[in-house]
Image (cartoon, rainbow, N blue to C red):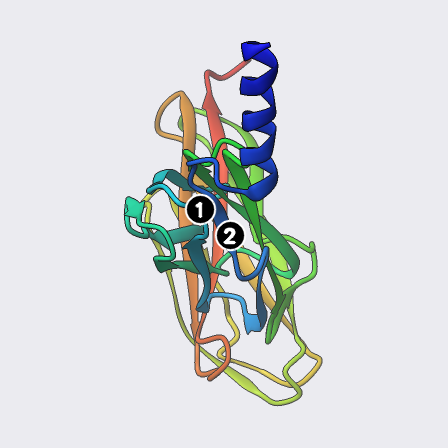
Amino acid sequence: MKSIVFTCMVIALLYDGTVAQPKLALDNMTIDLGTLYSGQIKTGRITLRNIGNQPLKILHVQPSCGCTTVRQPKSELQPNESDELEVSFNSALYHGPIEKYVNIETNDPLSQYVAVKLIAQVKEDLTPTLGTYSIYLGNVAVGKKIEQAITFTNSSGKSISIKKITSTSDRIAAKSEQTRVGPSDTLTVVLTALAEKVGYESSTLSILTDSKNQPIVELKVYYIGQKEGQ
């Protein structure tokens, strides 16, 4: 009889919502950054609120990609307390529709893991004709050079001046004979890589322009050095 009474009391507590526990509530499950140009950084926010009756612990907040950073919210929210989760997306090396996630772990027993979606549409003034900002040059024998030409289309509707091209590695370089690209014209950039050792080598190339929307066009270029004959 006592066990029946106890069970009824537990059920009544659950029904009334008076069980002591934290509860996470988000004002939005999606952060829509809208349209931005490749290379721009844009920030969005959502609100986290503890609608439970016990302290809510924010145990972990982790973006799914290195292109996304977060400003960590408070580590603990008291009942009815809220805080903002700030998410910044770096669109460099991206184009087209983007979908990323920010994973939130809390001590909410009914919703321990929550994934917030981040979406954006990335445009370009200089659009890579290969459809990617990541260029693989292949396997290169140590001591040898490899050269590859890539092109971009000016989709801005107006002329764009090319100021200079820089590289983060002295083993990978890029150059272009063009200093100006007319509307709908193409820009040709020649990539050159010298393999000095066995293994993976990469560089970030930056094309500096006078475009207000996309002043820097970044490329990720990489190759694998190998012994000759392999």
When asked about the image quadrant of residue 60, the answer is top left
In this view, the residue in front, 187 or 64, is 64
**Residue 109 vs residue 79: left or right?**
right
Between 63 and 22, the residue placed more toward the observer is: 22
* Residue 183 relative to residue 170: left or right: right
Label 2 sits on residue: 25
Q: Secondary structure at mark 2?
A: strand
Tag shown at residue 104: none
Q: What residue is drawn where x is 47% and y is 44%?
A: 23
- Residue at left 41%, top 22%? 199
Residue drawn where x is 59% and y is 55% of the image: 29
Q: Are marks 2 and 1 in contact (CB under 8 Å)?
A: no
Mark before the other along the chain sequence, 2 or 1: 2
Q: Quadrant of residue 172?
A: top left
* Residue 150 versus residue 214 in the image, above or below: above
Look at the image and tell me whether residue 211 can be seen.
Answer: yes
Q: CA distance from mark 2 to mark 1?
A: 9 Å
Quadrant assignment for the C terminus: top right
Residue 160: x and y, percent?
53, 83
Which element is circle 1 on? loop
Quick one: which residue is furthest to the front in this view? 1
Place of residue 4 in the rendered image (x, y in percent of width and height, measured from the top left): 61, 14
Residue type pointed to by label 1? Gly
Q: What amino acid type should be assigned to the residue bearing mark 2?
A: Ala
Number of residues whose C-alpha sits closer than 10 Å to that of mark 1, classed few (under 14), some (14–19) or many (20 or more): many
Q: Residue at x 31, y 50 (%)?
A: 78
Q: Along the line of sight, which residue is nearer the eye, 215 or 28?
A: 28
Position of residue 79 measured from the top left corner of the image (x, y, whole percent): 36, 51
The residue that mark 1 highlights is: 52
